[in-house]
Amino acid sequence: MKKYYLLTPGPTPVPPRVAARTAEPIIHHRTKEFGELFDRVQEGMKYVMRTKNDVLMIMGSGTAAMEAAIANTCSSGDKVLVGSIGVFGDRFVDICEAYGLSPLVIREEWGTPLSPQKVEDALKKNPDIKIVTAQHTETSTTTVNDLKTIGAIVAKTHALFVVDSVSGLAAQELHMDDWKIDVLVSGSQKGLMCPPGLSMAAISEKGWKHVETAKLPRFYSDFRRIRKSIATHETPWTPAVSLFQGLDEAIKMIKEETLEGVWKRHQTLAKAVRAGFQAMGLKALSTYPCDVVTGAWLPDSVDGKAVIRKMLTDYGVSIAGGQKHLKGKIVRLAHMGYMDAFDMLIGLNAIENALSELGYKVPQAGQAVEAAKAALVS
Ligand SMILES: *Cc1c(COP(=O)(O)O)cnc(C)c1O
């Protein structure tokens, strides 16, 4: 018998309460019963996103909402500014190019947050920029962006601020309205503690003006159609009913803990994991680490892919390695969604064991867990 521990930055573990709701009988989506569920999820998503704006529900993983954000706000030839600090920032570049747009890109070294100054300079130099994109938490580099500062800069221009908070929502502090975010996208399988398959987009009043005039083709994820159907408490197409049921329960759990409580828990777990890595002699990947996943450089002598594989096959502990040029060089331990202190102790202990079995001399066996425990109570 081996127990399985899912400690990856998406998908994340689904709480039993949420899983049970997704197993409920399917109800028809053009009914009063679905309408009530839809309205609860709508109201709950507004709470989680800290917004008064409608939240559009899109079937598909987070990338579906990212693509919809571009297709619904741009016309051919529009100037887009992509702030990229990792894999998911680059995904906006790929999406733009797929739609024939040639984005301007600000790239930071991986592990560094987006410079608000560079965004401000680019906007001054290019007053015709239509949208600016950024990640809330860049999962690939375990880094958080200063959205509040960047939002205030973009808000002074005609450009929209498009934010991907797929991994940050319901985990790290975020205020859509107060931080002047115009399009906020997220997904079900990270902080929201649901199975993968559902994504969301909320749009500000300023954003809707762009949506009304944007000319890029779109149909399935046409924000105008999705918004129109909110008035009748439904989605334009058949929704993922089971995921709505699950999300309804997940939102209930978030409300029981309070959103501030959820943010605080992630902050505490992040602190503990950082302390654990440090005690193992591993250097932090990010100069501005986020609260949802923590990355650390592995010693050169160790093959990172072997660490991940060993942890999964020998201990049943699933964590993430690096993407693109970080492949084999880092580990990423997630504390996203349905996770608590003991999950982190398991993750740290498993990493320490794997490293030591692969020949790395940890400074002091057991020290990672002790350091994490000390950070949890301090
Ligand atoms: C997971 C993630 C996404 C979306 O990826 P999907 O696989 O489409 O769900 C987008 N941005 C960030 C920052 C993510 O972590």
Image (cartoon, rainbow, N blue to C red):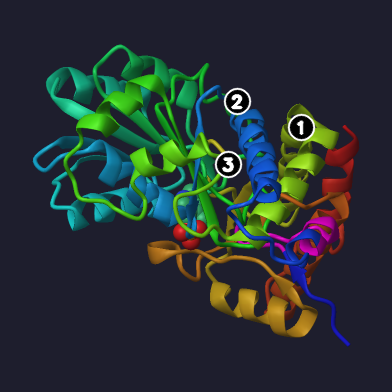
**Disc 1 marks which residue?**
264
Question: Which of these two is toward me, 122 or 95?
Answer: 95
| Residue that appears at 13% across and 52% down | 100
What residue type is disc 1 on?
Lys
356 above or below 252?
below
* Mark in the foreground, 3 or 2: 2
**Disc 2 marks which residue?**
50
Label 1 and label 2: CA atoms lie apart by 16 Å
Whichever of callouts 3 and 2 sits on the residue coming sooner in the sequence is 2
Q: Which residues are magenta?
A: 7-20
**Disc 3 marks which residue?**
168
Task: Give the side of residue 347 with respect to residue 72, left or right.
Answer: right
* Mark in the foreground, 1 or 2: 2
Q: Which residue is situated farthest in the top direction here?
A: 156
Where in the figure is residue 266, as x and y percent of width and height?
Answer: 73, 40
At numbered mark 3, what does the secondary structure look like: helix, strand or loop? Answer: loop
